[in-house]
Amino acid sequence: MIIFENAEQKIRAFNSYPDRPRESYHRVLTARQRERSFVQQNGNVSDENLYLIDRALRSYFMMNRGNRMGTTEGFVSKLGNILRNNEINGILARLREVTIIAPNLQQYKPDAKRLYESLSKSEHGLSADGTHFCVGATKVMHCLFPELFVMLDQNVGKAVGYRPSQYNNFESYWNVMDICRKELKEWQEIHNDTNSLLQLDTPPTTLPRIFDKCASIMGIWLKSAQSNRKRKSIKGADTEKGQKLQMLEPSQPNILSIEGDAMIKGTVTSQGKYADKKDICELYISADSSNRLPHKYGKRKPIDLRIGEFIYEAGVHETQNGVVWISSVLFRKELGTEKTRLVDALTEINVRKGDKIRIKSKEEGIFVFEKI
């Protein structure tokens, strides 16, 4: 799980990020009146809702740069004509009750593809300048079906590893849908449901919207890191035995160069509660010892961490401000990297939120967790 890892922190960062007025988008979410979509049982979408979508795209999603959408009347007319097409109308009717976590979602992929292509096409499409409307199409689909479709723009694309030219097509879009579904499934396995994820955000919200927030802020952080940091390559050198030293990232220390045991200090913190009321524990590492852990902003760095009797693969992360922490999900290596929660591993050795801890770096490459 990458996008939803430390979801509360990402959601909080997104919600506090300087942004455009969100009222127009919130109206889209609330105007459904507890329905899952804007679509009526016969597949129709009211003119009133079409105008709400137009307003959200212009004011919040800023899709009218360079007057790409043209006039409101013109855009609403073109969108209405596309959605009233008999084939598209039938697709809308079939999708109206489907959500992102529907177990049979794959069977709706052809319908999603046809809808995407109808909204994104350049000829007789939605853009006023005759160009493709790919990013805008995903936002229209999300507005029509807020509990089903994710959005794919530059920030989300960067978070999932796309270059700017790679995500303006349906297969790339559906791949992001699959990423969202996979991570939601992992969240369910860890937290027992997805309600705990919804509770991390301020309403109105949906699961695809939370995915968008987490992925978008990741993309923003990654772009900021790339523009503010100079990339330096560190070339490996041959040792006397003909072996090469470990290739390191710019922010990663050479763990092998530390003589003896390296002491790393930190604190057990909580990012909220699981469904079973246990803390979503993380390990925040003190600034004066964080250089002894491999870390890089925007990337998960795996380490082997012994907690009690077991060795786990843990993920080390770094915030934009340089804070280093170990995330709440572990993988127990003795059982074929079986996923477990950090809080459960800590409970076994009587460690809880607020406790001060230390981690020793051993020469054999295993970090050993201890309570102070």
Image: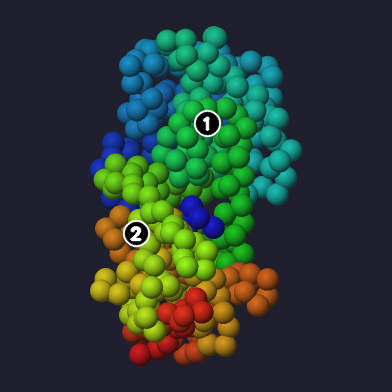
The residue lying toward the viewer, choosing from 301 and 172, is 301
Query: Eyeballing the image, is 329 above or below 266?
Result: above
Query: Eyeballing the image, is 86 above or below 254?
Result: above
Residue at the farthest front position: 240
Q: Look at 34% across and 15% down and name the residue there.
A: 67
In the rendered image, is residue 272 in sight? no
The residue that mark 1 highlights is 166
Query: Which corner quadrant holds the N terminus?
Result: bottom right
Query: Eyeballing the image, is 325 above or below 363?
Result: above
Percent of width and height locating residue 334 = 65, 77
The residue that mark 2 highlights is 251
Q: CA distance from mark 2 to mark 1?
A: 28 Å
The residue lying toward the viewer, choosing from 196 and 323, is 323
Q: Earlier in the sequence, mark 2 or mark 1?
A: 1
Percent of width and height locating residue 239 = 46, 66
Query: Which corner quadrant holds the C terminus?
Result: bottom left
Q: Look at 62% across and 64% down and name the residue there.
A: 189
Decide: few, some or many residues near mark 2? Use Cα within 10 Å; few <14, some 14-19, many ≥20: few
The residue lying toward the viewer, choosing from 372 and 44, is 372
Find residue 19 and report its image quarter: top left
